[in-house]
Image: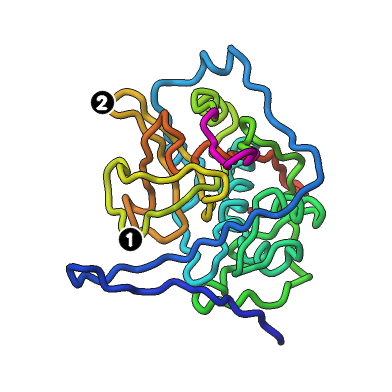
Amino acid sequence: MQFRFLVTIAAIETTADSVPRKHFAKGFVRQPSNGVRKVAIITDEMRAAAPAALDWSTKGATTAVKDQGNCGSCWAYSAAEGIEAALYQATGQNVGLSEQQIISCDKVDQGCIGGDLPTAFEYVMNNSGIDLQSDYPDTSGAHGFWGECNKEAKKVVQITDYEYAIPPCDGSGSGACRNQKESDMMAALNEFGPLSVCVCADWDGYDNGIYTKTCSGNYYDLDHCVQLVGYDTTGSQSYWKLRNSWGEPWGENGFIRLPMGENACGVADEAMYVKAKLVSKEESV
């Protein structure tokens, strides 16, 4: 069996105060696309329906926090989590799906070297489905290899469509993304469920609280894909809640909160959701 190897893996550096700090793997690499970008239509009714606070991670709509380990596969994790969320919205079932299948079998993206959300979703659509995580578990995180595709993998859940939740930043000019409508993203999150987003994740040392460090939202600075699960506008500082793929020990049990209203870390640059279904009613999940 032949393997391809990830050149850049998570590392440990010693900070000025001599406390070791881990550098976590990321992996967002934007892929070229000639297709039409489908964007959801956000209506006034959807805007009015968005509550003041929302957290899908406490509603049973998300699986447990995952850990991509030493593989630059955030894009595959974010995509798999997006499909999981879509299945929950369609059926009420919460099941883990195989990010490893996307890492190993999507030949447009580059496995542990990096990839993108639309191409990951296209792979699952063209493959007519994705397997369960329990049947096709992660093997790349421990060593940074992404291995050969298991072509015998089951096709349990299928994507029927995917769209951008709000118009994505197109990187025109200097790449500044200053006109992203976070209020519409609130409505989209409420209407469609958890969203897959790509961000600039300068978060290695994050522990807790609303992230206050300046974090670029520029189109060209995005380097990591995660899952947007909620928001809260009821306190003195409104925030977004995101689920990361660096394990539960990181951050707030695997989550981070970003300030709302400033496109912090590019959270509103490339927000996507999918629609999904069970391929067969006979499939056991």
- Is label 2 in contact with label 1 (beta carbons under 8 Å)? no
**Residue drawn at x 58%, y 76% as measured from the top left:** 6
Position above or below: 231 against 219: above
**Residue 159 image-quadrant placement:** top right
Position above or below: 274 against 150: above
**Residue drawn at x 40%, y 40% as measured from the top left:** 241
Q: Residue 178: within the magenta?
A: yes
- Return the x and y of residue 239 as percentages of the image width and height: 37, 33
Is there any visible trace of residue 283 in the rendered image?
no
What are the residue bounds of the magenta stretch?
170-179
Q: Which residue is mark 1?
A: 249
- Return the x and y of residue 75 as percentages of the image width and height: 59, 56
Give the spatial CA distance, label 2 vs label 1. Answer: 27 Å
**Residue drawn at x 54%, y 70% as measured from the top left:** 71
Mark 2 or mark 1, which is nearer to you? 2
**Residue drawn at x 55%, y 47% as measured from the top left:** 198
Q: Nearer the viewer, residue 92 or 227?
A: 227
Q: Earlier in the sequence, mark 2 or mark 1?
A: 2
Q: For the residue labelled by badge 1, is the local secondary structure a helix, a strand or a loop?
A: loop
Position above or below: 104 against 229: below
Residue at the front extreme of this rendering: 173
Q: Which residue is mark 2?
A: 236
Q: Amino acid at mark 2?
A: Ser
**Residue 11 image-quadrant placement:** bottom left
Position above or below: 32 against 178: below
Residue at the bottom extreme of this rendering: 1
Q: Amino acid at mark 1?
A: Pro
Q: Nearer the viewer, residue 182 or 280?
A: 182
The 10 Å Cα crowd at callout 1, few under 14, some 14 to 19, many 20 or more, is few
